[in-house]
Image: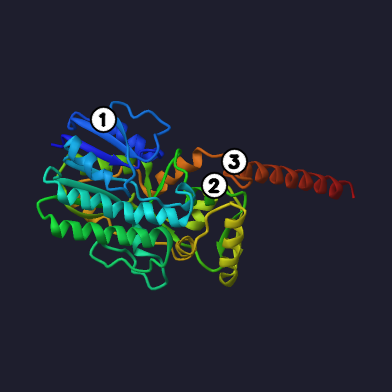
Amino acid sequence: MARVVLVTGVSRDIGSRFTRLLAADPAVDRVLGADVVPPRDDLGGAEFVRVDLRSPVVSRVLAREEVDTVAHLNVIAAPQHAGGRATMKEINVIGTMQLLAACQRLPSVRKVVVKSSTAVYGASPDDPAMFTEDMEPRGARSGFAKDAVEVEGYVRGFARRRPDVIVTTLRFANVIGPRVRTPITRYFTLPVIPTVLGFDARLQFTHEDDLLEALRLAVVSDRPGTFNVAGSGVLMLSQAIRRMGRPSLPVPAFAAATLGQAFRAFRLADFTPEQLDFLTYGRGVDTTRMREELGFKPCYTTPEAFETFAAAHEPGVLNAERVRSAEQRVAEFLGVREDLNGVRQRHG
């Protein structure tokens, strides 16, 4: 049983919600929420500890509080959340290195849970139908995906040096839900959604509540290893756009990068090269190990998770209700014309 759990990255929504969830779990004695700035939301029964993971101070915190379990959620996916790409990389990579170095030195630490991403697999036309956890991460050219690959590399090194510690890495598919704000959710809320001409990416999602529950399960039970986590099923990009009720704008592949730069410049969406690859080719991951070894079954399928997100946002001009209304008006108009034509023919 976890006695004292340290959760990193609690200044953001997912981190603070997970900390509250753990603090209310009877299987956990005490929860500490760590970050460089205080969380905006209440942490419930957890305690906040102000600490920068990039600093050696984190080692003293772990020792002083006799932490036995670390849940590392502080791997940032968007540069704006960190104050720029350089700072983001420092927090993700250097912060993880310092945290794992501190864990390695302390015999009290017996479990480390790391929140990672299926972005480590990249996205390309040569991808398999489904990535399994045994496949080498590839295609991560820059940004968050590259950071995630490096972070996982340090985690594997730590596991080799401390074989007595239970290490669990959860690779989540894109997280979505009513409260989630990420580059992908901003993309789907654009008034007109650009797509790459000739491609229709396969998408998988993890609902925000399923993410929290998978992390909780990893903390309170002993499930070492690396696990893909995603809702069952897939959703094509075109299907997702239709569910948002928004028109799409197909763009030739050669112009997609330029358009992405323009969107970033005007802060409309974060179209990084890795995001463009994902929205072009998509990605599918196998979740057999999640169900059979981690013992986790998501409450939401991929389509259901996306529906909760779509329902929480203003429908676009092409939403189903408006389309049905327009179709009804057209049908009524055509019916009136047919009646008028019949009258003219009878009196002609």
Residue 229 as seen in the image, left or right of residue 260: left
Q: Nearer the viewer, mark 1 or mark 3?
A: 1
Residue 133 as seen in the image, left or right of residue 313: left
Q: Quick one: 12 or 50, which is closer to the camera?
A: 50
Q: Are marks 1 and 3 in contact (CB under 8 Å)?
A: no
- Which residue lies at the image location 25% right of the left edge and 59% below the top edge? 154
Residue type, mark 1 in image? Ala
Of labels 1 and 3, earlier in sequence is 1
Q: Report helix, strand or loop for mark 1.
A: helix
Image quarter where the N terminus lies is: top left
Residue type, mark 3 in image? Glu
Residue under label 3, please give it.
Answer: 321
Label 1 neighbourhood size at 10 Å, few (<14), some (14-19), many (20+)?
many
Q: Report helix, strand or loop for mark 3.
A: helix
- Which residue lies at the image location 48% right of the left edge and 49% below the top edge? 83
Residue under label 1, please give it.
Answer: 23
Residue type, mark 2 in image? Met
Say which mark, if any, is on residue 244.
Answer: 2
- Decide if residue 339 is in sight here: yes
Most distant residue in the left direction: 164
